[in-house]
Image: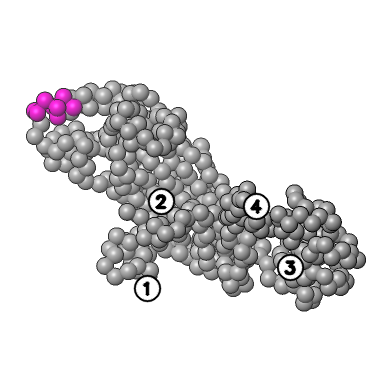
Amino acid sequence: MGHPATKIAELQRTVTLVDACTFGTDWMSWDTAGDRESWTQEGDDFSAVRNVPELLAEQVEAADLLLVNKIDMAGERQVNVASGVARGLNEKATVLEVEFGRASVKDIMGNVLDQHHEEVAETTCGLPDGHSHNHSAESTCTDPTCTDSSHNHEHTHDHSCNDSTCTDSSHSHTHTHDQSRNDASCTDSSHSHSHDHGDSCIDPDCTDTSHSHMHNHKSSTSTDQLGISSFVYKASVPFNTQRLLALLNRWPIPIKDSLELGLELVPDDSVDNKAFAGVLRSKGFCWMAPMKWTSTAGSDAWRHDTAMYWSHAGKHFGITTAGKWWSNLTKEQMKSYFANNMNEYERIMKEDWISEEWGDRRQELVFIGSKLDEAEIRAALDACLCTEGEMDMYRMQLQNFLNAAFTGAASGPSLFDVASVGHVDQ
């Protein structure tokens, strides 16, 4: 069940407003949504426990357009941090730095309006004679003497009428002024001079009142300038759960209350795993090997079939269950799930299916941060992977467990039941 709004509207574009004044402090906050006034509805306990930095990250990551707001109130460093982190989290989105949340309709809507106009044109063209075509001058009637009444001669003249002295009455001179708007002395009254000056007005001393000077600035803060980079860690064997949890329990916690890129987040050289100190955001799926293959209390055999979701932002870190790996099903069973979307099935087979033995079980984690030491982070995670000897033991324990489960020898919970959650939170 989706949001009721999805029944009457289709979501085509997501815009996220980022508060440049508070982004850095919210990113380093310990707060949950329930700690903030009016952030959640009364009784919504699930939303109340969501961490503020993680919510910020998810909203930035989901956006097509990011408006970094209040640049007139925030300091330069705050704006750089907000814009830089936003761009690092979502490289595909357009980032605009704005005041009072002001942005042009074209920036907000993107190509949605163009698509709408194309759809309207497609549905009106080709109808029987007698309708009004409202043709543009690009592809229709260019003959001023045409008297054919089967179509309407009223059309825009954007691409043909460049002569300001033209008095030809066979067409309308109402047109956009894109090609002549740089001429401040233009007094031609046959057209309107009111136009968007966002792309051309670069003179801070401009006092021309014939147009609006409200415009936004594309973010000039690059991720390279702030030392922000990212990489994806992948592996085709499980983590040894004990070694991974030991590593995560030594994850360095930033000591600052506000995010300041370019400075050491964890300046103490004695801190273990300092390679992770510059990590601002990490997330993805991971595969953790069971530690206790039994049917008794405390068994975590369910880890074999359960994907774990790794999510870290700011000072918060957690690993929770994320559903079953697709390889719990046969390929034929999977195809039935994707009967109406076989492209997704093919994508899973091509990108996520690691081997016939283990299917889509894998490590796939993205790390985003400032001055990342990728080699050290990879080495630390590699040290947590199961060795060849541990994988041999994994196979043997899995086979024994399955034999017991399917012969009725075990009376405990099924391998396919997730009775508990592996969770780490710092």
Q: Which numbered disc, 1 or 4, marks the residue closer to the eye?
A: 4
Q: Residue at x 33, y 36 (%)?
A: 337
Which amino acid, by three-letter code, is at mark 4?
A: Asp
Tell me which amino acid carries mark 2.
Answer: His
- On the question of residue 84 being in view, the answer is no
Kindly state the secondary structure of the residue where label 2 is placed: strand
Is 144 left, or right, of 63 in this rendering? right
Which residue bears the numbered disc 4? 129
The numbered mark, 2 or 4, whose residue comes first in the sequence reads 4
Question: Looking at the image, can residue 408 be seen?
Answer: yes
Among numbered discs 1 and 4, the one appearing first in the sequence: 1
Q: Quadrant of the N terminus?
A: bottom left
Q: CA distance from mark 2 to mark 3?
A: 45 Å
Mark 2 or 1, which is nearer the eye?
A: 1
Q: Amino acid at mark 1?
A: Glu
Asked if the stretch drawn in magenta spans residue 177, the answer is no
Residue on which the image places disc 3: 195
Residue at numbered disc 1: 37
Q: What residue is at 41 percent from the left and 43 percent from the top?
A: 284
In the image, residue 193 lies at what x, y percent?
78, 70
